[in-house]
């Protein structure tokens, strides 16, 4: 028998140890892969906790940074209920969290709208000396955007510049959006102009920033410039912003063009785009198209229902809006602040006082939505429109939250409509006490006194307006003819077709006499004689726009008019009769609702 040397025995033992260690490592890697596979299959927080426990039991969580980061990322980005609370507990036991781990927490908090927490995590990251990367800042800037935290946003921009990420296109786009939505349009444009190779996302950020602060005309101008000069295809976020701008400006033709583009270029529209289309068609007077898109949607959320309910409210379809609300509840979608505002507005526009009270009481009873001044404003408007001004005042006085100009403005408007000067004076005093600088408030007060022929009070209010430098926004009506928008003011004599328009107005008035139309001179709130009142009434902007549309649109086509002020009762009666005489459908949007005139009747049933 050959005896092995001590050296050979040592080498063999060493080889056995290596073989054993390799086997152990392979076994650990195998178990780690198995756990990571199980991690991907988790469907809820309970399953996740079981897999997490397995990672800990096998010492994978402490021995493998990759495993720890994977566990944290899965939990933070899952969207499960209370997942971020659990993710925070995981994060706290990681020995040396890296940049990826901090980014995971920031992203997770932003995703669940805990924006302050996201900023706190970043602050901790800086204090611990962990260097951020280019993935840190887009979500962090989104948090600043949603919080409207401009000072923090500027500080973070400084960090971006210092660390050399100012040339990263994703960071640049986030900065554009942040500055824009915080009202710093100059800074937003400065960042945009410095981008050498502007992408579709860069343009979309500019469009979204303008939409975020209600600069609808600028938003559409940028969108058109992008499409015309760059040939870039806008991202869906840019499309959503452009559709919102179309909805708020009544630009139906452009909205329809965007819809066509989306259908040609995107195989499946997401819920945000579809909701924007519902909103756009509703606000542009095409309720049937909005309902068609809504019914075809495979899934809907509270925002979708809110857009559709608001659309029905705009068109005076209060009962249909209530049915839609009931449908939403049956589908298991929880009502939120916005939905309740939409439903209460729908009841208000349709005179559904009993139903509106019931909805408001249900909201209070369920306690899931804390009533805000908007909700109370809707209730006051509901009662005031119905002539229940004493009850409306009682509602304001018993509000458990601070009274603001919103509720008093609504109440004042109701007092003017129902000619209750005494209670109107109460509203006027409260508005002025709140340091109102809105010319519209003084105008409503002045008109209330004018209706009561209290001319000294009218003069006093007008003088106060002048002393405060408040200027009245003139009423105007807009009509779109052959793709071009035409804007008319009262007694407009500046349009190139002015001569033809006034000839048409004279012809319309002549035909109206045969239908029993008599001008309602009480709508002219000036201390002038009857003849001058009739002349002024003839030139109301809506009538001028209507005459122009009848002249220059094909017979039988729908006429669409948008107004910036509430329609007077004379224009309402006038337009009803014109729709019958000329056999035309006329859609008028007066601020916050639509009127469809057809065959001598109006969709509002004379309640608006």
Image (cartoon, rainbow, N blue to C red):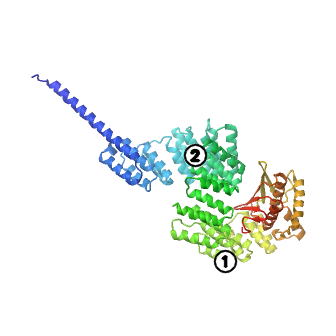
Q: Is residue 52 left or right of residue 5?
A: right
Q: Marks 2 and 1: which is nearer the front?
A: 2
Residue 385 image offset from top left, x and y in percent: 69, 71
Q: Residues within 10 Å of mark 1 (few under 14, many from 20)?
A: some
Distance, label 2 to label 1, CA atoms, is 52 Å
- Quadrant of the image for the C terminus? bottom right
SS state under label 2: loop
- Residue name at image x 32 percent, y 44 percent: 60
Residue 525 image offset from top left, x and y in percent: 81, 69
- Residue name at image x 30 percent, y 45 percent: 59
Would you identify the image quadrant in which residue 569 lies?
bottom right
Q: Is residue 124 above or below residue 414?
A: above
Q: Which residue is mark 2?
A: 268
Residue 30 visible in the current orientation: yes
Q: Which residue is mark 1?
A: 390
- Residue name at image x 55 percent, y 44 percent: 157
- Quadrant of the image for the N terminus? top left
């Amino acid at each position: 028998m050959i005896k092995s040397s001590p050296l050979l025995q040592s080498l063999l033992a060493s080889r056995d140890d290596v073989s054993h260690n390799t086997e152990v490592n392979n076994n650990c890697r195998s178990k780690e892969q198995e756990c990571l596979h199980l991690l991907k299959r988790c469907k809820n927080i309970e399953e996740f906790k079981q897999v997490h426990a397995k990672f800990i039991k096998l010492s994978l969580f402490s021995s493998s940074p990759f495993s720890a980061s994977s566990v944290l990322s899965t939990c933070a980005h899952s969207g499960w209920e209370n997942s971020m609370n659990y993710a925070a507990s995981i994060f706290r036991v990681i020995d040396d969290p890296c940049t990826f781990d901090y980014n995971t927490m920031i992203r997770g908090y932003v995703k669940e709208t805990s924006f302050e927490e996201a900023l706190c995590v970043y602050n901790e990251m800086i204090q611990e000396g962990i260097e951020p990367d280019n993935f840190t800042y887009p979500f962090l800037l989104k948090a600043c955007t949603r919080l409207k935290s401009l000072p923090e946003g500027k500080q973070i921009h400084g960090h971006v510049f210092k660390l050399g990420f100012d040339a990263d296109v994703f960071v640049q786009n986030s900065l554009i959006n942040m500055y824009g939505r915080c009202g710093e349009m100059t800074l937003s444009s400065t960042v945009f102009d410095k981008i050498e190779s502007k992408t579709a996302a860069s343009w979309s950020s500019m469009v979204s920033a303008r939409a975020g602060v209600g600069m609808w005309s600028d938003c559409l101008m940028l969108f058109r410039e992008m499409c015309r000069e760059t040939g870039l295809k806008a991202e869906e976020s840019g499309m959503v912003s452009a559709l919102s701008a179309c909805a708020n400006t009544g630009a139906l033709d452009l909205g329809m063009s965007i819809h066509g583009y989306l259908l040609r270029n995107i195989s499946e529209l997401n819920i945000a785009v579809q909701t924007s289309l519902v909103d756009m068609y509703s606000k542009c007077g095409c309720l049937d198209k909005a309902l068609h898109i809504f019914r075809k949607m495979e899934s809907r959320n509270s925002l979708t229902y809110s857009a559709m309910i608001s659309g029905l409210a705009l068109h005076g379809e209060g009962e249909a809006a209530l049915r839609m609300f009931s449908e939403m509840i049956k589908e298991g979608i929880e009502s939120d602040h916005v939905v309740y505002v939409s439903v209460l507005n729908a009841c208000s526009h349709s005179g559904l006082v009993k139903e509106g009270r019931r909805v408001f009481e249900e909201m209070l009873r369920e306690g899931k939505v804390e009533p805000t001044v908007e909700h109370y404003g809707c209730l006051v408007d509901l009662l005031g429109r119905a002539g229940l001004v004493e009850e409306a005042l009682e509602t304001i006085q018993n509000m458990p939250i601070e009274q603001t100009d919103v509720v008093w403005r609504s109440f004042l408007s109701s007092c003017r409509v129902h000619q209750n000067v005494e209670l109107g004076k109460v509203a006027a005093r409260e508005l002025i006490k709140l340091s109102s600088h809105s010319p519209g408030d003084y105008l409503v007060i002045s008109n209330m006194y004018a209706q009561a022929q209290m001319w000294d009070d009218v003069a006093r209010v007008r003088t106060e307006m002048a002393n405060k430098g408040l200027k009245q926004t003139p009423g105007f009506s807009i009509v779109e003819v052959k793709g071009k928008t035409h804007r008319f003011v009262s007694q407009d004599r500046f349009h190139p077709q002015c001569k033809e328009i006034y000839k048409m107005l004279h012809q319309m008035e002549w035909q109206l006499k045969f239908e029993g139309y008599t001008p309602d001179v009480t709508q002219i709130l000036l201390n002038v004689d009857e003849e001058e009142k009739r002349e002024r009434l003839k030139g109301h902007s809506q009538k001028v726009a209507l005459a122009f549309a009848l002249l220059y649109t094909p017979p039988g086509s729908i006429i669409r008019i948008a107004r910036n002020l509430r329609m007077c009762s004379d224009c309402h009666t006038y337009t009803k009769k014109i729709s019958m005489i000329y056999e035309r459908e006329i859609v008028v949007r007066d601020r916050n609702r639509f009127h469809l005139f057809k065959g001598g009747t109006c969709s509002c049933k004379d309640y608006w």
